[in-house]
Amino acid sequence: MNVGQWYVLIEEQAGFGSGIRWNLEKAIPASNLENAAEVAHQAALNHMPKNPMSPQSRAVFRAPDGSWVVDVKGATMRFHFRVSVGEYFGVFPGKPSA
């Protein structure tokens, strides 16, 4: 990853019941911000999440900040995932300051 590079970030819902959490599943590099926005749109339409196992349909929503929320209906359950665009700033040692 290069500082200043744009990425499309795909987060998926994982776990069940009170154990639901979000996992960053993919960070897809993009050539620039415009390219990242287009890749994010395509990911919202075409990304195949881990769950549900038998996707039946998806409802796709774009938020005002340009991120996407996708609700995927399976045979027996529904899951959702998020797609957003982010600029990479690097990895920092230690814990954040208070």
Image (spheres, rainbow, N blue to C red):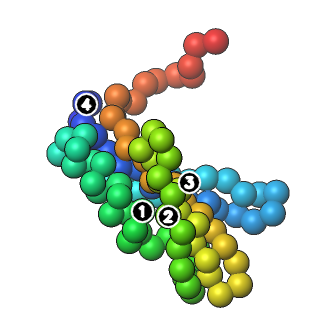
How far from the left and from the top, in percent, is residue 58?
53, 73
Place residue 48 in its image quadrant. Answer: bottom left
Instruction: State which mark lies toward you, 3 or 1.
Output: 1
Res 60 label = 2
**Which comes sooner in the sequence, label 3 or label 1?**
3
Q: Are marks 4 and 1 in contact (CB under 8 Å)?
A: no
43 to 38, vertically: above or below: below
Place residue 96 in its image quadrant. Answer: top right
What is the C-alpha distance between the residues marked 4 and 2?
Answer: 28 Å
Place residue 56 in its image quadrant. Answer: bottom right
Q: Which residue is mark 1?
A: 44
Q: Amino acid at mark 2?
A: Val
Q: Which residue is mark 3?
A: 23
Q: Amino acid at mark 1?
A: Ala
Q: How many marks?
A: 4
Q: Are marks 4 and 2 in contact (CB under 8 Å)?
A: no
Q: Are marks 2 and 1 in contact (CB under 8 Å)?
A: yes
Q: For the residue carrying disc 2, how many other residues have a C-alpha within 10 Å: few (<14), some (14-19), or many (20+)?
A: some
Res 64 label = none
Asked whether, in this view, residue 49 is left or right of residue 89, the answer is right
Considering the numbered disc 2 on the image, is that residue within a helix, a strand or a loop?
strand
Asked whether, in this view, residue 22 is left or right of residue 47, the answer is right
x 20%, y 41%: residue = 32
Q: For the residue carrying disc 1, how many other residues have a C-alpha within 10 Å: few (<14), some (14-19), or many (20+)?
A: many
How far from the left and from the top, in percent, is residue 71?
58, 66
Q: Are marks 2 and 3 in contact (CB under 8 Å)?
A: no
Considering the numbered disc 1 on the image, is that residue within a helix, a strand or a loop?
helix
Asked whether, in this view, residue 29 is left or right of residue 44, the answer is left
Asked whether, in this view, residue 85 is left or right of residue 5, the answer is right
Give the camera-side residue of 49 and 64: 64
Which residue of the protein is positioned furthest toward the right in this rendering? Answer: 18
How far from the left and from the top, in percent, is residue 89?
34, 28
